[in-house]
Amino acid sequence: MNDERAALVKRAAAAAVMLVGGMALAFAAYGEGALNILFLVVVPGLLVAVFVLPLRSAVRHRGLRRTGWWAAALLGGGLLLLAAFAPRLALLPVLAAALFLILGWPLTATAACVMAVAAVRSLRSSGPTAARRAWARLSWTWLLGLLATYGYGLTRLDAEMVDVKDRVCRFDPSRPAGPRGGQSLLPLSDTSCGADTVPGFVNPLLAVLAALLLVCVAGYIRARRRAR
């Protein structure tokens, strides 16, 4: 019971750090607009972090885990059928995920920092599952960092637009007239109004984080096989 209570306290502390750090970063980036992030992203994110993920990780019964996998398979199959017969409707989850990344990248970045601290603590501990836990937490660190960086890059798209709906570029007399550019989601780029509005560090950082994620996932798989 004491161990469960200590684990709950640790999760609550991590959630509080995510809330404070994420909102501080959001206010620094968006000012008063960060209040929208509080209601649309932070509160649902905290609910998932505090309740859903611990319940998922605490499931040990094979029947329950098998049920979860079947539910995931049915959901994935449903999305594939929707993409095949109604592509426009299938884009809704993608748009929702993109909106979450755009609004929630400060919270995701803070979560990556919290997970990095947990990974360092796992590296300093000993035990039969210490290596597997450390690789898993490092994988989550780089994945969250990857999502946060991509979400920040998405916020820079249309940065030079006066009216995003009508795609009207801001008037700048110092900018020479030339052919219109375009946008790219991978790599992230927006040259619709001239110079690329996505900062130059975004795409190289995405590549580095993706490489680190692959290395850590491979390390986790190897550690899990050794534990067996």
Image: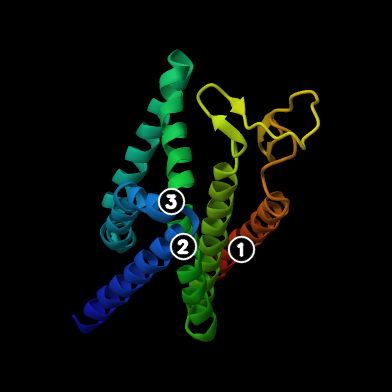
**CA neighbours of label 3 inside 10 A, class few (<14), some (14 to 19), many (20+):** many
Amino acid identity at mark 3: Gly
Name the colour scheme. Answer: rainbow
Which residue, as the protein is rendered here, is positioned at the far front? 173
**CA neighbours of label 1 inside 10 A, class few (<14), some (14 to 19), many (20+):** many
> Which residue in the structure is indicated by mark 2?
25
> Which residue in the structure is indicated by mark 3?
104
Number of numbered markers:
3
Query: Residue 189 appears at what percent x and percent y?
Result: 69, 38
Residue 55 located left or right of residue 104: left
Which one is in front, 134 or 41? 41
C-alpha distance separating marks 1 and 2: 27 Å
> Which residue in the structure is indicated by mark 1?
216
Vertical position of residue 120 compared to residue 115: above or below: below
Which part of the image, by quadrant, shows the N terminus? Answer: bottom left
Q: First in sequence, mark 1 or 2: give its number.
A: 2
Vertical position of residue 196 compared to residue 225: above or below: above
Q: Quadrant of residue 214?
A: bottom right
Query: Residue 100 appears at what percent x and percent y?
Result: 43, 44
Amino acid identity at mark 1: Cys
Which one is in front, 175 or 1? 175
Residue at point 41% right, 32% down? 93
**Which one is closest to the eye, mark 3 or mark 1?**
3
Label 1: element kind: helix
